Amino acid sequence: MNYDFSWIIVERALPKLFDGLLVSLQLTVWANVIGLTAGFLLALCAISRFRVVRWLAVAYIEVFRCTPALIQIVWFYFCVPMIFGVWWSGFLMGVLALGMNLTAFNAEAYRAAIQTVPSSHLDASVALGLGPVVSTLLVVLPQALIIAIPVLMTNAIGIFQQSALVALISVEDLVYQGRILAGETYRPIEILSTVAVFYLAISIPMSQLVGFFESRVARMLGR
Amino acid sequence: MAFLEVSKLSKNYGVMPVFKDFDLTLEEKDRLVLIGPSGCGKSTFLRCLMGLENISSGDIRLNGNDYISVNPRGRMKLQRQVQKNVGMVFQHYTLFPHFSVLSNLCLAPVYARRMPKAEARDKAMGLLRKFGLAERANYYPSQLSGGQKQRVAIARALMLDPRLMLFDEVTSALDPELVVEVENTMMELAESGMPMLIVTHDMHFARNIATKVAFLEGGRVVEIAPPAELFTQPKEARTKSFLKNILRFEGGDL
């Protein structure tokens, strides 16, 4: 193939792509704000003593884990306004859909981490006379959070990739800008490759960081 | 009045009885070592004393006070106040990995006993100094050897001034080299007069530290006697065959 890769196209596209990247990052950050907090609460529900609470939590988790994120986003954008009569921007709908999706995955991460804390630590807490509240707050949850960090970060990277789907509900994220520019310039190779490089540039350092944290966690917990 | 009195203790795992009418009496000067084949209920017995297991009937008294008992409706009653007089050390250290050695020691006094932090800290440093671990105070458990971890665990239990210490196979997870340092710490504690209940597979250590040795099988005490007696002239045939097997395995007599 004899293609003349035009760097000038890439250069001219950069400002718009950076605007798009900013939107993608904002989506990711807000989705994580929702996912990290609501996911934690949902995990507590999923291991609750009350059966009904547990069932509801598990049902939520399964619905969001077992349907495509694409459907969730599109459904939010088109169906929520019709059902609930609210007219929110695509960005807000995107954040909500991504956040609720991440909530399900993070809840699983938290739940697994809580259950990884050895039961012998609970025995030791009882032997030391620590009450259930103190041992939950000071013994179990801190260990669980440390164990969960690498998985939560992996999920955060995942939701950054998934955020590309909001281009479909006309949120002006990185992919949206890329597709517009590719159409305007008739230069999809330059533009879409640059978009891919943008995603890589964010995700690769993040996943390196996950590896770093994984080894730190393993060392700290003596495993 | 006996220091520790266990009477008619019964416990089941499902339909499987672990203990049936288990009786045991201990004087304040006693250090009792429990030996017996695995599954005989040694560890479960310690866990019952610590209130970690539910019991189906019977009661456990410390200094004559009802400490763990079962009411007529079959509900277990556990008096925290008395339970707080018992300390326990486990096989797998169970130090909290996200706290430093010093924080591991201070956690229970500060959060369970409302001891002022500075006081807890001083007390912890005093214990660590005594154990030769003072310079490890700010280390994390993962930075310690198994022997050091287990000695920190002992110090952590001692922070609450227990009147009875329970040791559940505390040297079983250790390299042979490190066993000695933990056993020496326990010997020192014994010499200071601490009543102890110890589950171990180390018969030499049992003989050195115990004032009484109990051989358990099938959830009951087969034989209980001072170590010199039990190890050299066991009365029961089952004790004899158990000791014979164990000592042959260890390659020597006591």
Image: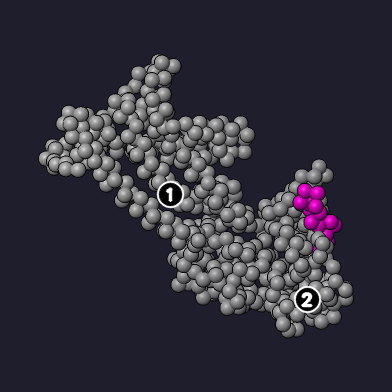
Q: Residue furthest front?
A: A1
- Quarter-wise, where is residue A95 in the image? top left
| In this view, A14 is above or below B9 | above
Q: Which mark is on residue A149?
A: 1
Q: Residue at x 77, y 58 (%)?
A: B61
Dots 1 and 2 on the same chain: no
Q: Is residue A89 left or right of residue A116?
A: left
Residue B10: within the magenta?
yes
Residue that numbered label 2 is attached to: B245
Q: Nearer the viewer, residue B110 or A202?
A: A202
> Comparing marks 1 and 2, which lies closer to the viewer?
2
Q: Chain of mark 1?
A: A
Q: Nearer the viewer, residue B186 or A216?
A: A216
In the image, what residue type sits under mark 1?
Ile
Give the percent coordinates (x, y) of residue B153. 57, 65
Q: Is residue B201 left or right of residue B178?
A: right
Give the percent coordinates (x, y) of residue B43. 71, 62
Q: Chain of mark 2?
A: B
Q: Which residues are magenta?
A: B9-24
Instruction: Identify the element where label 1 is drawn.
Output: helix
Q: Residue at x 18, y 34 (%)?
A: A187
Distance from label 1 to label 2 (Cα)?
49 Å
Count neighbours of disc 1 (C-alpha within 10 A) and say few if under 14, some if 14 to 19, many if 20 or more: some
Instruction: Identify the element where label 2 is drawn.
Output: helix
Q: Residue furthest left?
A: A8
Q: Of helix, strand and loop, which mostly describes the magenta segment? A: strand
**Quarter occupied by the N terminus of chain A:** top left
Q: Residue at x 63, y 63 (%)?
A: B90
Q: How many marks?
A: 2
Q: Is residue A199 left or right of residue B74?
A: left
